[in-house]
Amino acid sequence: MALDRRLLGWITGFAVLSGAWLAAQWPQPLLHPVLGWLPAPVCTVLTALVCLRTARAAPDRRAGRFWRHMTLVMAVLLAAICSSAYDSLLGPGAPTQRSSPLTLVLFLGGVVVVVWALLRLPMGPRSRRDRLTFSLDMAVVLAAAMLVTWFFAARAEVSLTGVTGTSWTLFGVLLMLFAAMFALAKVALAGAGALDGRALWIMGGTLLAGGLAGSAAPLLESRPYVNDCHISIPACCVGLTLAAIRQRRAFGGPATTATRRRRRPFSLVPYAAILAADAFVLAGIGASPRESRILVGGSVLLTLLVVARQLVSLYDNSHLLARVDASMLELRRHERRFRSLVQHSSDMSAICDAGFHVTYASPSLLRFTGERSAAAISLPDMVHPGDREALSRATASLATPGSTTTLQLRLRQPDGTWRWFEVVTTNLLHDPSVRGVVANARDITESRRYQDQLSYQASHDGLTGLANRALFAARTAEAVAESRWDAVQGGSLAGGAAAGGTAVADGAAVAGGAVAGGGAVADGATGGAAFASGAVAGGPVVGGSAEGGAGVAVALIDLDDFKAINDRLGHAVGDALLVEVAERLRATVGPDDVVARLGGDEFAVLLCGADRNRSAAIAEAFIDALAAPVRAAGYELLVQASIGVARHTADCAASDLLRRADMAMYAAKELGKSRWVEYGPELDAHAVEHAQLAAELSQALDRDELSVVYQPIVGLPGGEIRGVEALVRWHHPTRGMVSPATFIPVAERTGLIVPIGAWVLGQACRQAADWTALLGDAAPAKISVNASARQLLEPAFVATVESTLRETGLDPSRLNIEITETAVFGGGRALDTVRALHALGAKIALDDFGTGHSSLGLLRTCPVDVLKVDKSFVDGVTGTVEQEAIATSISEIAQALRLEAVAEGVETPEQAARLLELGYRLAQGFHFSRPRPPSEIPALCAPALAHAEASAITGGMADRARFRTFEGE
C-alpha cells in the first residue's frame, strides 16, 4: 500500500503539472507544445502499474479480472495518447485539434473495454422479478442519460465536429458518458458484486469527468497548441488510481463490508435521472420543432418506463400483502394449535417468579393441583421433603439469565400421593415478554417404575431373584474397599496369608496339609502327592489361608451333577430345584450377606464381617441345608454341593476373591464332592502345576512320550485270556511315569483327551490286528478301549472309529468301547454317538457300573453288551451277605439281560473263587496280571501254558495263578 500511495502522489503531481501547463499556455504559447504532452503518458503508465498490482492482490478471480481489464484500458489509452500527440504536433495542419482515424479507434477501443468490463461484473443470484425490476430501473437511467447526452450532442455537434474534424469524436464522448452512467447505475441498482462499491463510484465519477472534459474541445478551437488530453487524461488517471487504492484497501480489510452502512430498500438513481431529464426537457422545448419532438418523445418513453416500473411494484406489493395475510393466518392457526396443546397437554407448564411462586399455570397444572388460579399454587410446598434440597440446588443454578436446568422430583397430589416429574426450568426473568422462570414438567412415574424394574432385572437373576454376577462383583468390591478402610482407620491392615494347607471339611483332609503336584495315585504309577482318603472327624480346618479376624469372605457353591437332573427330568424341574436351593441359601446367611446366582447351577455368597469360625460355620450350614431332600415340581430330589471358601487378605484384590473361591470349589470336587474347602496358597501352586502339566501334555504325542499297555481280561475258572483293555501311560522325560489319575483329568478339561483318545484307539486296533496275524485264534478275542464323555460329544468320533477299523482291518465285533454311566445318562448327542458305534458292529461296555447314576432304565435305552463291575463292589464279595449283595444283583441282571459281566479289580484268589460262585465268567485285576506292554501279551496267550495252568485258580495257595508268575515276584 505504501508504494501505491507514492505512485498516487506522482500521478497527482503530473496531473497538477499538466493543469499548470494548460493555464500557462492559455493566453499565448510560451514553450514548445511537445512539453504539454509529456505528463499524460507518464500518468497512464503509472496508473496501469497500480491497476496491475490491484489485480494481482485480488482474492476473488472476478475482481482480479476486472482490474486486469483496467490495465488493458491504460495500455490502449497510452497508444491513443501517443497517436493523438503525433496528430497534434506532426500531422497535417499541425498544430491542430484534429484527430486521425487511428486515434479515434484507439480512444473508442479503451471505452469499449471499460464497458465490457462493467458488463462482466456479476449481479449475484436474483429472482426473475428482481431481474425485471433491475432492467426497468436501468432502462430509466439509460434513457434519461441518452436524452441528456443527445441534448448536449445536438447543441455541440457542429462545433465539436469542426474542431476535431470528425463526428466520431462526438460518438466517443457519448460512449464515455454512457459508460460513466452505466457504472454509476450498476453500483446504485445492483451493487458492486465482487468489487468495492466506493471504488466503482469513484470510477464512474472519473468516467463522467473524462466525458465532460472531452466535450469541452470546442473551447480550444482558437488555441491549437493545447489539447483537451492535457487535462482530461491525467485527471482520469488520478481518479482510476484512487479507485484501485480503495479496492486494495477493501481486499485487506475483511471488516469493511460488515461495518458498511445499511443500504436503502430502494435506489434514488432512477428518480434523479428522471428529474434531470425533465429539467433538460423544460429547458430545450421551444428551441426548434425537431428538438422539441425528440425531447417530448424521450419524456414519453421515460413515462412509460416509470409506469411499467410502478406496475411491477404494485404487483410486488399485492403479492407481498397476500403473503403477509397468509402468514398472519398461519400465525393465528399456530396460536390456536399452541393454545389447544397447552390446554389439553398432560405436561404441566408454569411461569414462576424468583421464589418459584406461580404466576401462570397451564390447565394441566391446575387440574393436577385442584386449584382454580395460579396464585394459589406454590411449587416449593408441593415438592417432596426429600427432593427440596435438589430444588434448592436447581434454583441456585438458575442465577444466570437464560440458564436452564433439569431435575427429577416428586410432587404431591391433592389425595396425598406422590408422582415423579421431570422438570425443565429456564430463567427468562430478563425477557420483558416473560419476566419469570419457565418450568415444564413431564410425568415420569411410570417411566421411573419401568427403569427401576429394568435396573433390578439388570442386577438380579430372573429365575431366583438373587443378585447376578455384575451386582455381586460390585458388592464384593464395595465390601473389600470398606474392609480396607476400616483396617486403615483401626491402625492395622490384615496382611498376608497364614501358612498351612488347604482347609477341608466334611470327612476329608489333605495329606500333609498341601496338594503337591497333582492328583490321586492310581494303577501303582508314581506321581505327585495327592489328597489323602482318610476322614477328618468334624471337618476341621487344616492349615489356614487368612487371618483369624473378621473380614470379607466369598463362598462359591456348585451343585453336583445338576446337569443330569436337567437332562433326565427337564428344565422345569431343574429351575424349580434352583429356586428352592436359592431360598435355602438365603435363609442360611445373615441380613448383611449377599447371595447371588452366577449362572447355571453356580451360586456365590458374600460374607461381610466374617471371621474364620463364621466362614466355616456357614459353609457347614450350606452343606446341612442342602442335605435334606428338595421338593421340586413334584419330585423329591437329593442335592449335593461342592463349596469353595476364600477369605480376603491384604494381597488379594476384589476380583481375585471369586477366582480363589472357584479354585477351592474345584478342590472340593476332587475330594469327592458334597464338602467344602477353604482357599490356601497351595491351591495357586496346584493350579500352576495343572497349567504346566497341560502345556507339557499337549506336546507329549509329538515327542513320543505316550505309550499303550494292556491288562488281560481272563475267563473263569480257567484263566485263559479272553481280551485285553488298552491303557495309556505317560513317560515324562523329567517327571518319570505320570499317573493317569493325574494327567487324564487335565486332558479332559483341556480337550486334549480327543486327540489322545484317537491315538490310543489307533494303537490298540493296530496291535490287535498284529496279534491276530501272529497268534491266529490264540490272539485276544476282544480289545477294549475307553472313550470319555468329551469324545462322545465330538461329531467326528464315529467317523474316527470307522476309519481306524477300516485302515487296520480289525473286525468291528472285536472292539469294545468302554463308556461310563454318567457320560450317557443325560441322553442327547452322547447317546446318539453310542448308538452309531453299536451300529458299526462295535460292542459297548458300561465301565464302573453301579458307581454312577445306576439307572436300570439306561440298560434299555443304551445299546449295552458288557457290564464292568466296579472294584468297590468286588472288594465286598468275601465279606458279609450285605456287602456282596450288589455284586450278586449285577450278575443276575447281566444273566437276565444276556449281557457279559466283567469283575474289575480282582486282587486275591478268594475274590476270584467267590466271583465264580456268583456266576461271573470274566474278570480282570492285579491277581491275574498288571497292565503289560504289547510285547509280553503273546507269551500269555500260548495254548500250552494256558492248558498246563488251567486249574491255577482252584488249585489252592500252593499253586499261585500263572499270570502272577509273569510279574517277576
Image (cartoon, rainbow, N blue to C red):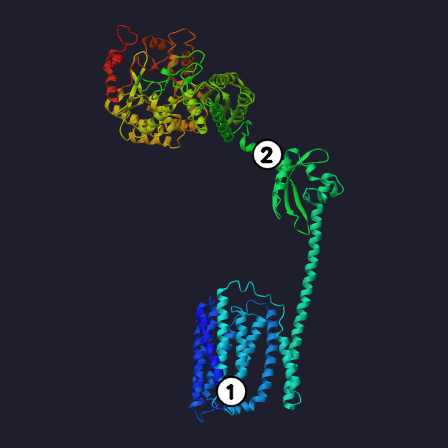
Looking at the picture, does residue 521 appear above or below residue 837? above
Which residue corresponds to the image point at 47% horizontal and 74% vertical from the top-left? 8
> Disc 1 marks which residue?
169
Considering depth in this image, is 188 or 203 the residue closer to the camera?
Answer: 203
Considering depth in this image, is 443 or 622 the residue closer to the camera?
Answer: 443
Q: Position of residue 852 (x, y in %)?
A: 43, 19
Q: Secondary structure at mark 2?
A: helix
For the question of whether residue 599 can be seen, the reply is no
| Amino acid at dot 1 | Thr
Q: Position of residue 862 (x, y in %)?
A: 43, 23
For the question of whether residue 180 can be seen, the reply is yes
Circles 1 and 2, Cβ within 8 Å, touching? The answer is: no
Q: Nearer the viewer, mark 1 or mark 2?
A: 1
Q: Position of residue 580 (x, y in %)?
A: 55, 22
| Amino acid at dot 2 | Asp
First in sequence, mark 1 or 2: give its number. 1
